[in-house]
Image (cartoon, grey):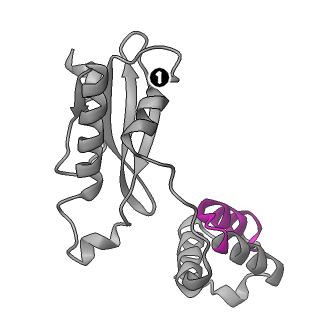
């Protein structure tokens, strides 16, 4: 690390960061540390590293938020609540500082719009180092749900790279 240790962060900031970590507010904890950690400002990567270490330290106290339901009836209701019928159901990879996830989207062609239906993550990228992936369970779940949802609405389902996480260079509407 670039010279900053947890005990060098002001006590009030450490307390707020720990509260956010325990509340499962990872981004908020990083932001709190980055904005208020000290002067000169702690680098963003160092903030992420410190928050990650706090997550490890406080793991048994973290109150994980339940994931929104991803069952087929819930997703059908979400599509039915959209302002217009989608032209397709699409799955794609996305990522953040914790790792890869798949997004399940309802997409329209004209205009090109997307509505998020589900975010599917089955762990962070440490799984790569532990030999736990592939296969990617996120992709398997997105394919199963997306196919069933598309079948229900008689729509196409598209997933450009279900076998390998990568940011999409081809979207469903690019295939038309």
Residue at mark 1: 80
Using the image, determine if residue 72 lies above or below residue 77.
Answer: below
Label 1 environment density (alpha carbons within 10 Å; few <14, some 14–19, many ≥20): few
Look at the image and say whether residue 30 sits in the magenta stretch: yes
Q: Quadrant of residue 12?
A: bottom right
Element class at badge 1:
helix
* Residue 41 visible, this angle: no
Q: Relative to residue 92, is residue 164 drawn left or right?
A: left
Which residue is located at x 50 percent, y 55 percent? Answer: 67
Q: Relative to residue 158, is residue 58 drawn left or right?
A: right
Residue 132: x %, y % from top left: 22, 72
Which residue is located at x 26 percent, y 58 percent? Answer: 137
Residue 54: x %, y % from top left: 59, 81
- Outermost residue, right side: 12
* Residue 38 visible, this angle: yes
- Outermost residue, bottom side: 7
Which residue is located at x 21 percent, y 14 percent? Answer: 176
- Outermost residue, front side: 73
Using the image, determine if residue 81 lies above or below residue 50.
Answer: above
Number of callouts: 1
**Observer-nearest residue: 123 or 1?**
123
Q: Relative to residue 114, is residue 125 drawn left or right?
A: left
Look at the image and say whether residue 87 sits in the magenta stretch: no
Q: Quadrant of residue 112?
A: top left
Q: Main secondary structure of the magenta part?
A: helix
Residue 80: x %, y % from top left: 47, 23
**Observer-nearest residue: 32 or 56?**
56
Residue 18: x %, y % from top left: 70, 77
Q: Find the magenta span and give its range.
A: 22-38
Which residue is located at x 63 percent, y 87 percent? Answer: 5
């Amino acid at each position: 690390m670039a010279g900053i240790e947890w005990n060098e962060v002001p006590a009030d900031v450490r307390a707020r960061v720990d509260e956010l970590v325990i509340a499962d507010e990872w981004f908020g904890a990083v932001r709190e540390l980055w904005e208020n950690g000290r002067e000169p400002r702690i680098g963003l990567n160092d903030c992420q590293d410190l928050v990650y270490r706090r997550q490890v330290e406080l793991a048994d106290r973290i109150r994980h938020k339940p994931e929104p339901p991803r069952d087929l009836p819930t997703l059908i209701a979400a599509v039915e609540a959209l302002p217009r019928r989608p032209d397709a159901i699409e799955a794609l990879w996305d990522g953040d500082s914790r790792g890869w996830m798949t997004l399940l989207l309802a997409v329209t062609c004209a205009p090109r719009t997307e509505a998020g239906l589900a975010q599917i993550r089955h762990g962070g990228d440490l799984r790569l180092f532990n030999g736990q992936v592939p296969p990617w369970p996120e992709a398997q779940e997105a394919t199963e749900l997306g196919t069933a949802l598309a079948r229900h609405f008689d729509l196409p389902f598209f997933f450009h790279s279900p076998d390998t996480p990568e940011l999409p260079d081809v979207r469903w509407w690019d295939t038309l």
